[in-house]
Amino acid sequence: ALEEAMDVIRTQILGPLKESGTLGRLYNVRLSGTADDLTETYDALKWNFLLAFTITYLLMAALFESFLYPLVIIFTVPFAAAGGFLGLSLVNSFIAYQPLDVLTMLGFVILIGVVVNNAILVVHQALNFMRGSEEADSFEGESGQGLPLREAIRESVKIRVRPIMMTTLTTLFGLFPLVVSSGAGSELYRGIGSVVLGGLLVSTVFTLIVIPALFTLVIDTQRKWAVKRKPQLAAQQPSGGSL
């Protein structure tokens, strides 16, 4: 593949020449043609990753009408990226060598829009329970009354864990043949499949463990900050006495 050839050229040819001082003083080398196009594609994918990250955050901020709650949800993306690299590493170790090509990098962009869904379910359900919203799913308790923070999170995870596991498992089983198949052309999509599979698996586990704890920490901090700010705001208000 072109990516493998580029790696060989950089590590085994250009690297020793630069270390010996041959390149950089009297001579320079520029990889052009298809290699140059590949470099431009890599650079474009990096910006596309940042663009997808920003758009996803802004969409969640508009849906939740807050810039704080999407920060909790977007925290799943680093775990998904780590899971993607882990999945790619396992494929390289046990199945076949898979370079970090364009399609594999595209898998990390896809992960941004996929892994936030589970966290959205948990956070949205917890907020509905806290507000006593009619949109909240049924649970063993009185309807129309807001639940305390920790009870709301506990109930939201209990209710949402089944649909989260169902959607995650069906996606994982659908991606598994893409990763382990050895037919003609399978190497083209093995990278993107391993990245999405590993990222989704790891992010799902951390969504059910880390996101509830992080959401609790954020809400507690927000409430403490509001309590501290309340006397200051009251002191800044003008007195209502008449002249």
Image: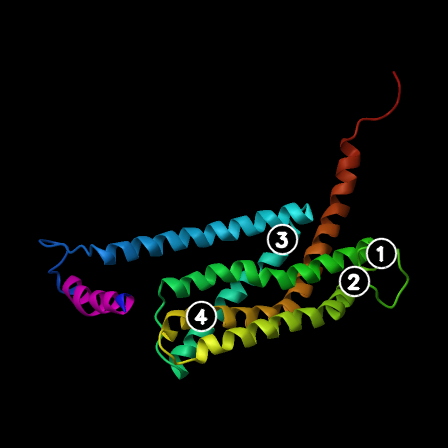
Q: Are marks 2 and 4 in contact (CB under 8 Å)?
A: no
For marks 2 and 1, the one nearer the N-term is 1
Q: Say which quarter of the image contains residue 173.
A: bottom right
Number of other residues with Cα within 10 Å of mark 1, as a class: few under 14, some 14 to 19, many 20 or more: some
Q: Secondary structure at mark 1?
A: loop
- In the rendered image, which residue does mark 2 sit on? 152
**Residue at point 58% right, 60% down?**
75
Q: Which mark is residue 70?
A: 3
Q: Are marks 2 and 1 in contact (CB under 8 Å)?
A: yes
Residue extent of the magenta highlight: 3-18
Where in the figure is residue 78, as x and y percent of width and height?
Answer: 52, 63
**Residue at point 61% right, 71% down?**
168
Q: Type of residue at label 1?
A: Gly
**Residue at point 74% right, 51% down?**
224
Q: Secondary structure at mark 4?
A: helix
CA distance for labels 4 and 1? 41 Å
Q: Which mark is residue 146?
A: 1
Where in the figure is residue 145, as x and y percent of width and height?
Answer: 88, 56
CA distance for labels 2 and 4? 34 Å
- In the rendered image, which residue does mark 4 sit on? 85
Residue 7, magenta (yes or no): yes
Q: Are marks 2 and 3 in contact (CB under 8 Å)?
A: no
Above or below residue 241? Residue 125 is: below
